């Protein structure tokens, strides 16, 4: 049996693919607190187990196929000039049975843990702390009905216990996803979806919107801030405090006045008030401005000067163009906002 | 010496009025290649934008338009016409027929597709393309003017698609040559049967979904108005009842091409023919029962999720049957690695990788992580690009000689094959990881420092390889038309009826309808030592259909009406439908008995029939 | 040239399927009707989702003028019967009888439409419009689509009648009449479902 260059090239190409697939097993796990392959919550762990199970089984299937495939190509390649007709084979009933039955068995092996996990994931405990998640274009509101607290963009939760999320949207369909902690669930405008979430370690976890919702879909990140129970209780107390730190400078005071005149209609600054736009209580302690820019003076000014440029199609009126504020006023506003820390 | 259907001097009028399935197939095919390039350009723009984090090549809105049109164009205006091109060219030849059952309707179907595609793509120049994804979910889609172009263009083109499906099914049911029972039909024709049934029952829900969107946007209906009691998830159900069968109706003809090509290049009959037919039908059937696997994260509850998850996994079984049968066709054969063969053979591992990630996605629990991420994008591009597109390329190289009488250049073909294979694996393999690393789909950019930068860069590089391959294909086609090697009647030592007639065929395909005595009827006759088919009738005048300009005008009328709806111009609507209506009326009242042609070499002598 | 067995009346037993083209037309049309059935099924599904989403407006039970709808139903059912008579006459090569029964069918169809228009105008006055609620949008979409199909059928059969008024029945024109009558039956069958699911179920609530 002669193997020509072409033979090996083709065979080699597919063995390479197989190797790549094998790398899947050892593959880079991604970034912590973001990747689904480094689960840090019970939900994500169950999902990761199924990802692994299905991957291994499917790698096995792929390997069998590729081995047979390479065998067929290498052994039965027509030699140049050979015009003979090989034996014509109609089929083989035994083989048909085999490659019908074995896949069915593999499916059963995948289906059983899937269904088990499905029901476990859907079982939202009655007594878990509730968090009402409302998705907007293009930001996230988090309400804690057990405490009467409302916040935005950063979702605080205590480590260890399950929390019961109630997911809804104010406008179009979005989807709530914290890959390192659990799977995703759509937020629909016309019904409430329920899902539990649990974190095994404290830390800040990345959250993504995973349903196309407009031009700002890619910029609708949020964070899940997992803290100890004591830290969480303290946070709740601070959020419930209707007082905010007094603006320390004249500029910040001016900023407060501007805020009360131009922004208060849509943005509450006490952690129990409902507002059309994100609640600003503790804004100065958040990780981002506009959901994705690092929280600092430059970025806050950037957002205020031209929100449409920072997040296309977002619904906040432009402070400069629509509300008539000038750059100095925005600078004062920025100083005020950055001073809105929890105490 | 026989005159082929291409022998007449080129005349635009001839091509605009043709009802010949071979010419209509050619029109479909070239339109498909054009839109494949358009969709490919849209993909290139997407990948360039995503090459670096926080890139500003495209802003969010423009990216969303590119992303929407990429999907819409590739699925509706590239893949579908390319496959319809093959179905039109090949199915009548494979069953021994002289044309399809309704040649006029065939032309109408093409022109409806043509004008629908034009209408949707014109949106780029008329205020912006649709930007809510090819799935166009409510209520997001209701916010954009581009949605109107999406809705109307697809209604028009979709109507054409349904007409063609009815045409193919009727042709296959009523016009097979004597002796060709259903279970002697080649797999490509079988896959056309199942795909056409899927089109009929899937495109009609799409029509419904599009009407709901249209009425909501244009006439203030309240289907999706939540405050009034509307329901947005309803749209998702209706759309996916279409959307899932849609992908199967694209992949099944691809499977058919692979079955035919692998058997031909292995010089061996298809292994397990009956299983293959059964598997095709089963895939089509189960394909209608799995739609909600696109909706696992919608909140339908664990029972619904489990049922649809299991049904989805089951589809893997008949698909696996097919893969093994293809491999066992090659085992024991003498496999030739010409370009058609390379693409058909390469289909197998590429499609299998896409197929197994499909089974992974079927596990609803795993899907809670995979859904709406780059993992899904990787999955469906493996089956569509690694699968359907490679099958289309295989079919091109395989059937080009029959349809155009020329062989596509093998050297260019092989270069194209390798460039394409490397490119598509580079682009899409890494995307499986990106999804698991947290990257959602349909994002116009991404933040740095998430570990996604290199992968996205590599993915973009692959896109350039694929572009190079497609450029080589276009060059190949042009060079072949200019000075390609002439094709013989049976260049692949083929098995099925199309190889028993000249390359290219005469206008009427078969001078005399053949008698089919077996599966792979042409191969059978050759193994019996015959040089031509046995015939069911003597040589005589052949009844052929008349060409007509009416289909083009009818479709044009719907095009005008489409703009009428988009710009709320009742004048436009009535003018457009008026044109269409008048055409329908004229077609109804004018008798059309076709024409009679003389086949090559017909001498009418008393009692004796000669062929040249 | 194929030989067709002619009966005593000069036509083959089933003139509508005596030719290749005729058979193809019938197969094609059955396929078309099955596709249309799925389209109507989509609108039925939409209607059933929203049957109770009245947005504060009147419900079906409060609105529906059942006696009138019953009359319209009877008219449509009878028109289906008259189209059967027409086809029977066609197969017996009784051209003028066929034309008579088709004309009756058209008149009954037009009457159905007239009643339906009257019915809709009533509903609009009572606050049940296309834009008043999801129930309204889905009701008028479903029932309106059906009405559009009836209108199309009326125009179709009328065109056939007028075009062929001086022509004898033959194997070219027989499939055209037959397909039109199949369409008419289809439209009638859809109405039976509408009557049941929209009106009867609507009354029961």
Image (cartoon, coloured by chain):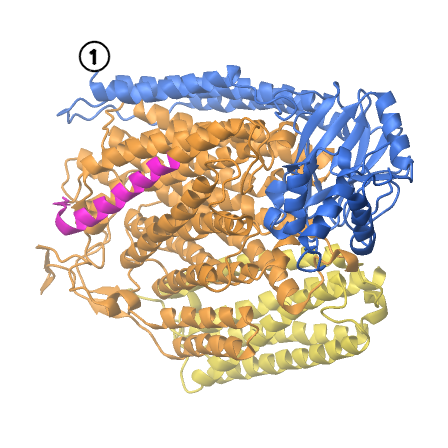
Q: How many marks?
A: 1
Rendering colour (chain C): yellow
Q: Is residue A108 visible?
A: no
In front of the other: B365 or C189: B365
Name the image quarter holding residue B146.
bottom right
Taking the view exactly as shown, the residue that stands out farthest to the top is A1
Please give the letter of the chain rendered in orange: B
Give the residue number, with chain letter if any, for mark 1. A1
- Up-down relation of residue C143 to residue A174 (above or below): below
Image location (x, y in percent) of residue A68: 37, 18
Residue shown at 63% from the left, 64% from the top: B217
Which stretch did the figure color magenta?
B462-488
In the rendered structure, the answer to whether residue C19 lies left or right of residue C90 reads: left
Residue shown at 31% from the left, 25% from the top: B330
Image location (x, y in percent) of residue B33: 33, 50
In the rendered structure, the answer to whether residue C176 lies left or right of residue B480 reads: right
Residue B463 falls inside the magenta stretch? yes
In the rendered structure, the answer to whether residue A331 lies left or right of residue A127 reads: left
Q: Chain of mark 1?
A: A
Name the image quarter holding residue B584.
bottom left
Name the image quarter holding residue B16.
bottom left
Few, some or many C-alpha atoms within 10 Å of disc 1 (few <14, some 14-19, many ≥20)? few
Could you tell me what secondary structure mostly forms the magenta stretch? helix
Rendering colour (chain A): blue
Image location (x, y in percent) of residue A343: 87, 31
SS type, badge 1: loop
Q: Is residue B442 visible?
A: yes
């Amino acid at each position: 049996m002669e193997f020509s260059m072409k033979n090996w090239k083709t065979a080699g190409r597919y063995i390479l693919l197989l190797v790549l697939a094998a790398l899947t097993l050892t593959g880079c796990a991604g970034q912590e607190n973001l990747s689904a392959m480094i689960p840090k919550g019970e939900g994500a762990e169950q999902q990761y187990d199924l990802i692994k199970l299905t991957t291994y089984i499917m790698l096995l299937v792929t390997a069998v196929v590729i081995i047979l495939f390479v065998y067929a190509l290498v052994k039965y390649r027509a030699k140049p000039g050979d015009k003979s007709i090989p034996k014509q084979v109609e089929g083989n009933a035994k083989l048909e049975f085999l490659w019908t039955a074995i896949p069915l068995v593999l499916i059963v092996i995948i289906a059983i843990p899937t269904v088990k996990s499905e029901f476990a994931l859907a079982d939202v405990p009655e007594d878990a702390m509730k968090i009402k998640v409302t998705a907007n274009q293009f930001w996230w509101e988090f309400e804690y009905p057990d405490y009467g607290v409302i916040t935005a963009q950063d979702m605080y939760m205590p480590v260890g216990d399950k929390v019961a999320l109630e997911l809804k949207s104010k406008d179009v369909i979005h989807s709530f996803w914290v890959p390192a902690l659990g799977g995703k669930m759509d937020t629909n405008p016309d019904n409430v979806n329920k899902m539990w979430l649990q974190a095994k370690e404290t830390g800040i976890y990345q959250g993504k919107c995973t349903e196309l919702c407009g031009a700002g879909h890619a910029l609708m990140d949020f964070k899940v801030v997992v803290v100890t129970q004591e830290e969480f209780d303290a946070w709740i107390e601070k959020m419930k405090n209707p007082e905010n730190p007094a603006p320390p400078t004249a500029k910040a005071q001016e900023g407060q006045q501007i805020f009360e005149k131009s922004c208060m209609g849509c943005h509450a600054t006490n952690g129990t008030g409902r507002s059309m736009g994100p609640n600003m209580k503790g804004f100065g302690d958040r990780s981002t401005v506009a959901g994705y820019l690092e929280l600092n003076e430059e970025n806050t000014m950037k957002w205020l000067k031209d929100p449409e440029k920072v997040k296309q199609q977002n619904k906040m009126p432009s402070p400069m163009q629509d509300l008539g504020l000038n750059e100095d006023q925005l600078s004062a506003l920025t100083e005020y906002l950055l001073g809105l820390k929890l105490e | 010496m026989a005159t082929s259907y291409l022998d007449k001097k080129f005349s635009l009028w001839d091509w605009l009025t043709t009802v010949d399935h071979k010419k209509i197939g050619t029109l479909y095919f070239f339109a498909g290649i054009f839109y494949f390039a358009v969709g490919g350009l849209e993909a290139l723009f997407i990948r360039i934008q995503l090459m670096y984090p926080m890139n500003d090549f495209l802003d969010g809105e423009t990216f969303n338009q590119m992303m929407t049109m990429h999907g819409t164009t590739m699925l509706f205006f590239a893949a579908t016409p390319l496959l319809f091109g093959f179905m039109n060219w090949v199915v009548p030849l494979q069953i021994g027929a002289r044309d399809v059952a309704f040649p006029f309707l065939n032309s109408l179907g093409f022109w409806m597709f043509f004008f629908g595609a034009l209408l949707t793509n014109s949106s780029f120049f008329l205020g912006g393309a649709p930007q809510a994804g090819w799935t166009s979910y409510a209520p997001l889609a209701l916010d954009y003017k581009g949605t109107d172009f999406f809705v109307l263009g697809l209604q028009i083109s979709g109507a054409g698609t349904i007409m063609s499906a009815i045409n193919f099914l009727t042709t296959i049911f009523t016009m097979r040559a004597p002796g060709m029972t259903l279970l002697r039909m080649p797999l490509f024709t079988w896959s056309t049967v199942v795909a056409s049934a899927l089109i009929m029952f899937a495109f009609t829900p799409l029509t419904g979904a599009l009407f709901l969107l249209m009425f909501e946007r244009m006439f203030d209906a309240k289907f999706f108005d939540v405050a009034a009691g509307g329901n947005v998830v309803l749209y998702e159900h209706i759309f996916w009842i279409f959307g899932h069968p849609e992908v199967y109706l694209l992949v099944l003809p691809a499977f058919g091409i692979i079955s035919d090509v692998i058997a031909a290049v292995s010089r061996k009959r298809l292994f397990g023919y009956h299983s293959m037919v059964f598997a095709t039908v089963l895939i089509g059937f189960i394909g209608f029962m799995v739609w909600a696997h696109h909706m696992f994260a919608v909140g339908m509850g664990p029972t619904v999720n489990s049922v649809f998850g299991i049904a989805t996994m089951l589809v893997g079984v008949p698909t696996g049957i097919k893969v093994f049968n293809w491999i066992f066709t090659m085992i024991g054969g003498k496999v030739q690695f010409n370009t058609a063969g390379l693409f058909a053979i390469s289909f197998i591992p590429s499609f299998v990788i896409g197929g197994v990630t499909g089974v992974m996605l079927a596990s609803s629990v795993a899907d809670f992580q995979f859904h709406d991420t780059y993992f899904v994008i990787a999955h469906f591009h493996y089956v569509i690009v690694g699968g359907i597109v490679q099958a289309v390329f295989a079919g091109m190289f395989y059937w080009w000689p029959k349809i155009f009488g020329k062989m596509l250049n093998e050297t260019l073909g092989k270069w194209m094959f390798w460039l394409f294979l490397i490119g598509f694996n580079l682009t899409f393999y890494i995307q499986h990881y990106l999804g698991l690393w947290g990257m959602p789909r349909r994002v116009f950019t991404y933040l740095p420092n998430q570990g996604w930068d290199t992968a996205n860069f590599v993915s973009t590089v692959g896109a350039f390889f694929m572009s190079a391959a497609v450029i080589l294909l276009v060059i190949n086609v042009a060079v072949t038309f200019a000075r390609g090697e002439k094709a013989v009647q049976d260049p692949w030592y083929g098995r099925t009826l199309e190889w028993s007639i000249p390359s290219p065929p005469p206008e009427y395909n078969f001078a005399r309808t053949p008698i089919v005595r077996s599966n792979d009827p042409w191969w059978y006759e050759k193994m019996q030592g015959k040089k031509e088919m046995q015939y069911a009738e003597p040589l005589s005048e052949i009844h052929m259909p008349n060409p007509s300009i009416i289909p083009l005008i009818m479709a044009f009328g719907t095009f005008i009406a489409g703009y009428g709806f988009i710009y709320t111009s009742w004048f436009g609507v009535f003018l457009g439908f008026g044109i269409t209506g008048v055409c329908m009326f004229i077609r109804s009242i004018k008798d059309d008995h076709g024409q009679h042609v003389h086949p090559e070499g017909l001498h009418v002598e008393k009692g004796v029939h000669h062929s040249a | 040239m194929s030989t067709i067995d002619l009966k005593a009346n000069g036509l083959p037993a089933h003139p509508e399927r005596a030719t290749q083209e005729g058979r193809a037309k019938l197969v094609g049309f059955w396929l078309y009707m099955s596709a249309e059935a799925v389209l109507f099924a989509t609108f039925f599904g939409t209607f059933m989702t929203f049957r109770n989403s009245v947005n504060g407006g009147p419900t079906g039970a409060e609105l529906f003028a059942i006696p009138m709808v019953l009359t319209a139903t009877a008219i449509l059912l009878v028109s289906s019967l008259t189209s059967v008579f027409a086809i029977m006459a066609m197969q017996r090569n009784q051209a003028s009888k066929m034309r008579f029964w088709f004309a009756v069918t058209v008149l009954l169809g037009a009457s159905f439409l007239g009643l339906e228009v009257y019915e809709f105008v009533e509903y609009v006055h009572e606050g049940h419009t296309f834009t008043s609620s999801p129930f309204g949008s889905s009701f008028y979409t479903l029932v309106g689509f059906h009405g559009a199909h009836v209108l199309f059928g009326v125009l179709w059969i009328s065109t056939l009648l007028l075009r062929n008024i001086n022509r004898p029945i033959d194997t070219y024109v027989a499939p055209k009449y037959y397909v039109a009558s199949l369409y008419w039956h289809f439209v009638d069958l859809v109405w039976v479902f509408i009557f049941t699911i929209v009106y009867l179920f609507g009354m029961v609530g």
